[in-house]
């Protein structure tokens, strides 16, 4: 049920606005504030989906009310109304975070449309925040081992900088989690983190994937396409499994890093890009350089900071926390209550050889949750973990 606050010092106008909103949707829950001070007091006590606020009010005016609301709950859609409308005031309100600005007397159709859009915008903002929290939880680094503490300390130091980071470690160890943590703690976190799995893209298509292409550049290029560098402009580009990238693509990536410019496949004009590069690999790149499969100059460009992610076998003390984390996550995905892992179940999980690391561990926890009863024992782990 949408909850709306109408802040207007003129009683007649306030009653008209309330009536209009009530007739628009009978489900609207509408409250009134006769001045700015009352509006702020009500806003402190309740969550509103939308606020209609007059600018010229005695004592605390509408601009002060807007400033307070945007500071406390910036997701709230605030529509400013004034009988003394001018362009400068409207621009100032929008800059301060108002959803829209309407002059008195308001055009009925425009007012109703603006209210409708404002309520929809609030829903989208809340939905986006919820989604971000879910994403953040999925990329959370879980554990309190010394190895993980070292990584977390490194992330905290390097994230606020623009330094390129090379993340090493075995498959399934959580290298992508490190990349996401660096991005989220960086100054670029309001922009995109774009991921590229270099091992999953055929060598003949990797350049198009990274730099885009122009229509007609090759047989299947039926239209222009943006590359990952362009999509990540202003944000972060995560090159996963970079050790599998072809030498020709490596040369172009090196040039892009040196000059901050790219040229789409089949294009002639260069394009400036502002991208922070994070890269990851499960390979020994120094060995790859010796054997001629990786460019040494690119390695030095990528490895300003190196963060090594250990295997799960190297941090088995984190298994109790990881079990609890995945237990709750998977149960939430299925809409069920978490299962109970007994102490001997945890001990059995710690005895196993986790060659597939965190990825394998999560799969095993999911298997146990599906196949076992409410309580999961050490016997259950022995029975199902290796199947």
Image (cartoon, rainbow, N blue to C red):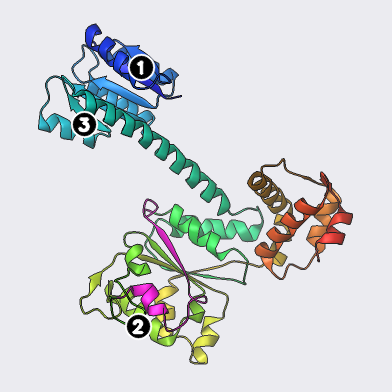
Residue 204 is inside the magenta segment: yes
Q: Residue at x 66, y 62 (%)?
A: 358
Q: Residue at x 51, y 44 (%)?
A: 133
Q: Where, quadrant-wise, is the C terminus in this rendering?
A: bottom right
Mark 3 or mark 2: whose residue is earlier in sequence:
3
Q: Is residue 122 above or below residue 106?
A: below
Tell me how far mark 1 sits from mark 2, CA to CA. Answer: 59 Å
Please state which of residues 374 and 358 is positioned toward the viewer in this rendering: 374
Dot 2: element: loop
Q: Which residue is mark 2?
A: 219
CB contact under 8 Å: marks 1 and 2: no
Specify whether 87 is left or right of 293. left
Q: Which mark is residue 93?
A: 3
- Tell me residue 302's x, y (percent): 42, 74
- Tell me residue 263's x, y (percent): 27, 76
Q: Is residue 48 above or below residue 239?
A: above
State whether residue 10 appears in this view: no
Dividing the picture into quadrants, the one containing residue 90 is top left
Dot 1: element: helix
Q: Which mark is residue 22?
A: 1
Q: Which mark is residue 245?
A: none
- Tell me residue 378's x, y (percent): 87, 54
Specify whether 358 is left or right of 376. left
Dot 3: element: helix
Mark 1 or mark 2: whose residue is earlier in sequence:
1
Q: Residues within 10 Å of mark 2 (few under 14, many from 20)?
A: few
| Magenta range | 187-213
Q: Residue at x 30, y 72 (%)?
A: 223
Dividing the picture into quadrants, the one containing residue 39 is top left
């Amino acid at each position: 049920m949408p909850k709306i606050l109408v802040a207007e010092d003129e009683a007649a106008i306030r009653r008209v606005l309330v009536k209009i909103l009530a007739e628009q949707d009978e489900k609207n829950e509408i409250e009134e504030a006769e001045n700015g001070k009352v509006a702020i007091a009500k806003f402190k006590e309740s969550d509103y989906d939308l606020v209609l606020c007059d600018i010229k009010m005695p004592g605390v005016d509408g601009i002060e009310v807007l400033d307070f609301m945007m500071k406390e709950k910036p997701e709230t859609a605030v529509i400013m109304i004034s009988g003394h409308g001018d362009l400068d005031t409207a621009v100032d309100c929008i800059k301060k975070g108002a959803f829209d600005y309407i002059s008195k007397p308001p055009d009925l159709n425009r007012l109703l449309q603006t209210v409708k859009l404002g309520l929809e915008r609030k829903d989208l903002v809340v939905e986006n925040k919820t989604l971000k929290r879910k994403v953040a939880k999925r990329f959370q680094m879980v554990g309190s081992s010394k190895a993980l503490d070292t990584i977390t300390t490194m992330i905290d130091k390097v994230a606020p900088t623009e330094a390129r980071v090379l993340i090493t470690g075995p498959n399934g160890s959580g290298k992508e989690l490190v990349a996401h943590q660096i991005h989220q703690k960086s100054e670029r976190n309001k922009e995109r983190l774009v991921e590229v799995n270099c091992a999953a893209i055929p060598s003949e298509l990797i350049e198009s994937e990274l730099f885009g292409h122009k229509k007609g550049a090759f047989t299947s290029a039926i239209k222009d396409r943006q590359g990952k560098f362009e999509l990540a402009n202003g944000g972060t580009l995560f090159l996963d499994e970079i050790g599998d990238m072809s030498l020709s693509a490596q040369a172009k990536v090196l040039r892009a890093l040196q000059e901050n410019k790219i040229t789409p496949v089949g294009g002639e004009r260069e394009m400036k890009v502002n991208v922070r590069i994070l890269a990851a690999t499960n390979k020994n790149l120094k060995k790859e350089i010796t054997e001629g499969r990786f460019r040494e100059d690119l390695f030095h460009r990528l490895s300003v900071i190196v963060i090594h992610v250990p295997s799960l076998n190297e941090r088995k003390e984190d298994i109790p926390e990881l079990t609890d984390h995945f237990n709750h996550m998977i149960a939430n995905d299925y809409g069920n209550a978490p299962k109970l892992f007994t102490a001997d179940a945890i001990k059995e999980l710690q005895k196993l050889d986790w060659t597939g690391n965190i990825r394998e561990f999560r799969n095993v926890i999911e298997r146990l949750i599906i196949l076992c009863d409410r309580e999961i024992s050490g016997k259950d782990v022995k029975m199902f973990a290796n199947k």
